[in-house]
Image (cartoon, rainbow, N blue to C red):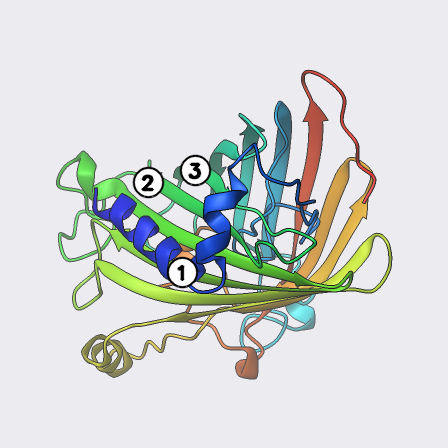
Amino acid sequence: MKIIAFLLLCTSISVYGQAQQDLSHLFDSTGPAHPKVLYTYKGTRIIMGHSTDMLRKHELDFRVDHRFGDLGGEFGGSKTFYGIDNSTDIRIGLEYGISDRLMAGLGRSKGSGEQRQLIDLLVKYKLVEQTQDGHVPVSVALLGTAVMSAMTSEEDPHKAAWFGDASDRMSYVAQSIVSRKFGDRLAFSLSPTYVHRNRVGYMDMNNMFALGVGGRLKVSKRIGIVAEYFYPFRSQASRDYYKSQGITFYNPLGVGLEIETGGHVFHINFTNSTAIQETQFIPETTTSWLQGQFRWGFNISRRFTLFGKKDWKK
């Protein structure tokens, strides 16, 4: 219930201003038609986090996400072929469009924090769609994710991967994604995010808020430059404790190319985050761009239409 309340609160704040009057007309079938803004992004992800774009009804999306090792620094360079010899995280998932506004997904990740062997379940709902005539100025989507670790419990009860019972294996994300497309080439997103982890290490935070910022610049019909950044609101006491243990937390930052090739959406990206799941890369990124601790990775999305026709023209 807390997660649902948070999502509703974020959404209310995001669209309260100019869109307040528009929302009452958006779902009024007797009113004038307002053409929707399509394809703010090419896919359902920006780089690390979600976009407001959705799968269409009956679309099945097979996804492979991969993060390699450090390009530079102590664990990078030519000895690891600039990180290609190492894999920090991998996710394979299936996601399905229940309707044009609602999608769900199931995935399995290697994991890159203390908790590994992750199974995730996600649901995303598009609450508001931006219109071309400015009647509704933004698109808003709500995301909920539940993640469970399937790894064997650690023996040390002070570690985040020690599980006293099944609930200790669970982590959750609630997110409100607000985006706007400016003209034909530029898109911008804000993602207020709440992360809850049932089990964390000493002086870590069970509950953490973060703000994500993302954008896309279209450079051709099928290629765009994308960037994404998350600012986690970690307490100073927690930062100071981990710094005394030789651990510094950094804010996740990613840049990359978004390429659409018909039924495929392909991302080539560079991030300092080693993890793919929001429950890990938002609160647990301990690698820095300035120290060569960034890596290249890719996201591959292959869509199939199970029923009916699909139009990929953009």
The answer to which of marks 2 and 1 sits earlier in the sequence is 1
Report which residue position mark 2 lands on. Answer: 149
Where in the figure is residue 104, as x and y percent of width and height? Answer: 48, 32
The answer to which of marks 3 and 2 sits earlier in the sequence is 3
Is 312 rendered above or below residue 130? above
Q: Label for residue 16?
A: 1
Q: CA distance from mark 2 to mark 1?
A: 38 Å
Name which residue lies at 49% across and 58% down: 19
Task: Work out whether residue 80 can be spotted.
Answer: no
The answer to which of marks 3 and 1 sits earlier in the sequence is 1
Mark 2 residue type? Ser
- Give yes or no for contact between labels 3 and 2 (Cβ–Cβ under 8 Å): no
Q: Label for residue 122?
A: 3
Q: CA distance from mark 3 to mark 1?
A: 26 Å
Q: Quadrant of the N terminus?
A: top left
Name which residue lies at 42% across and 75% down: 250
Q: Nearer the viewer, mark 3 or mark 2?
A: 3
